[in-house]
């Protein structure tokens, strides 16, 4: 039996709320099918299945909040018999009765009975006693009842509502705080003359319609993808050591119109042509801003690229998004003095930075990667 678990959609996610099941027991599913919608700090996310089989049992109810890793459903493979729900024999449940708590009980003015210890904990934690059902003598609220309410996230009386923008910012901030605490970063920077790349881009766009035209960012993504095939140590996760990944899935930082950012993955970027990468960007950026992403697009990035585009900021230093081991930053292309073969000229210059995990690689590896990216951008025809 295959266990379908609540996926982790980033280092900032600890739990999610099942908004809707899109399947029922007996349904046949295959890899890539969306079988559930989960509500997270990043909005409603379509959750995909990565196995093939028949839905055997749904273990989590809709509107239920569960931690990452919780088994949500059981899927029977083709080789396993599927037992219908009505054929299951009810299991005998024996429960040992616990002694009723014998504590002094305080009578509240509004009729709620509560032990002094339970009342003190409720006050300290901001728990509304009106929302708790007592299990003590005479239906009194006990310490265990209050602690159970805390675990079940019963809200305080005046809980401040958090909008989606603030929720996303808080999620990103939590991940970045974790990164700063736990990852020993090192930083490298280089500059590249983008003259040849921009000339190539201009010529290429003459052969394309307005909808198909290429933007400079697509050359940056392709250069990163090809460089990772030559310096694969930066493409992976730090999970009890460096775990290099075969697939190159570039997480691309997308700024949301309401504020905050999300980082969807462009899968198999190294195997996509320039035009296919542009099509991927044209597809994923609007869906990200509309909060219509799939779970695999939020959980499978193997490295991150942040690009300021036309922001006129020359340099950006990224913070690694765990468990990844590197992030590449591209500033704006600006005209700067450029010396070459003893001659001084003005060229369109791009600053490239690398923030990397010193546990996984060192400056020599990082430098080799940046020089490879730079060489590809200097020879755009090879992209």
Image (cartoon, helix red, strand yellow):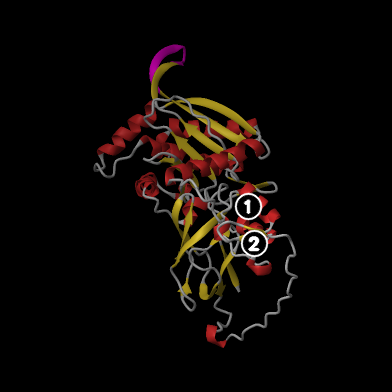
Q: Residues within 10 Å of mark 1 (few under 14, many from 20)?
A: many
Whether residue 347 appears in magenta in the rendering, the answer is: yes
Residue where numbered disc 2 is placed: 141
* Residue 367, placed above or below residue 222: above
Q: Secondary structure at mark 1?
A: helix
Can residue 361 be spotted in the picture? no
Q: How many marks?
A: 2
> Could you tell me if the residues under marks 2 and 1 are in contact, i.e. CB atoms within 8 Å?
yes
Residue 48 % position (x, y)? 48, 62
Q: Which residues are magenta?
A: 339-348
**Residue at image coords 44%, 36%:** 220
Q: Is residue 159 left or right of residue 259?
A: right
When asked about the image quadrant of residue 103, the answer is: bottom right
Whether residue 78 appears in magenta in the rendering, the answer is: no
Residue where numbered disc 1 is placed: 122
**Residue at image coords 56%, 84%:** 83
Q: Main secondary structure of the magenta part?
A: strand
Q: Residues within 10 Å of mark 2 (few under 14, many from 20)?
A: many
Residues 132 and 344: in front is 132
Can residue 124 be spotted in the picture? yes
Residues 81 and 188: in front is 81
> Who comes first in sequence, dot 2 or dot 1?
1
Any mark on residue 9, and which?
none
What is the quadrant of the C terminus in the image?
top left
Residue 18 % position (x, y)? 49, 62
What is the quadrant of the N terminus in the image?
bottom right
Marks 2 and 1, how far apart in space?
10 Å
* Residue 338, placed above or below residue 285: above
Q: Is residue 159 left or right of residue 214?
A: right
* Residue 119, placed above or below residue 201: below
Residue 279 % position (x, y)? 35, 48
**Residue at image coords 48%, 69%:** 30
């Amino acid at each position: 039996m295959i266990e379908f678990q609540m996926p982790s959609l980033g280092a900032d996610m600890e739990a999610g709320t099942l908004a809707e099941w899109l399947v029922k027991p007996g349904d046949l599913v295959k890899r890539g099918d969306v079988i559930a919608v989960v509500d997270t700090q990043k909005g409603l996310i379509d959750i995909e299945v990565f196995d093939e089989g028949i839905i055997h049992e749904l273990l989590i109810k809709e509107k239920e909040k569960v931690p990452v890793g919780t088994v949500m459903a059981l899927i029977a493979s083709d080789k396993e018999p599927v037992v219908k729900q009505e054929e299951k024999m009810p299991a005998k449940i024996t429960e040992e009765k616990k002694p009723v708590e014998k504590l002094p009980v305080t009578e509240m003015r509004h009729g709620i009975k509560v032990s002094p210890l339970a009342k003190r904990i409720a006050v300290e934690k901001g728990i509304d006693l009106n929302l708790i059902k007592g299990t003590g003598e005479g239906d009194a609220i006990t310490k265990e009842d209050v602690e159970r309410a805390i675990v079940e996230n019963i809200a305080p009386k005046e809980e401040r509502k958090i909008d989606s923008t603030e929720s996303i910012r808080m999620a990103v901030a939590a991940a970045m705080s974790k990164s700063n605490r736990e990852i020993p970063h090192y930083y490298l920077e280089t500059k590249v003359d983008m003259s040849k790349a921009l000339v190539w881009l201009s010529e290429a766009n003459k052969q394309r319609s307005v909808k198909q035209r290429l933007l400079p960012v697509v050359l940056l993504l392709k250069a990163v993808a090809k460089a990772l095939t030559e310096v694969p140590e930066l493409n992976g996760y730090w999970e009890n050591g460096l775990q290099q990944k075969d697939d190159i899935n570039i997480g691309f930082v997308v700024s949301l119109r309401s504020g905050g950012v999300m980082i969807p993955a462009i899968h198999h970027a190294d195997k996509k042509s320039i035009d296919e990468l542009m099509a991927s960007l044209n597809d994923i950026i609007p869906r990200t801003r509309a909060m219509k992403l799939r779970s695999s697009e939020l959980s499978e990035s193997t490295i991150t690229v942040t690009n300021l585009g036309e922001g006129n900021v020359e340099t950006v230093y990224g913070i690694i998004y765990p468990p990844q081991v590197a992030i590449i930053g591209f500033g704006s292309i600006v005209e700067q003095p450029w010396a070459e073969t003893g001659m001084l000229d003005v060229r369109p210059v791009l600053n490239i930075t690398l923030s990397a995990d010193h546990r996984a690689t060192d400056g020599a590896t990082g430098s080799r990667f940046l020089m490879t990216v730079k060489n590809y951008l200097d020879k755009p025809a090879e992209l």
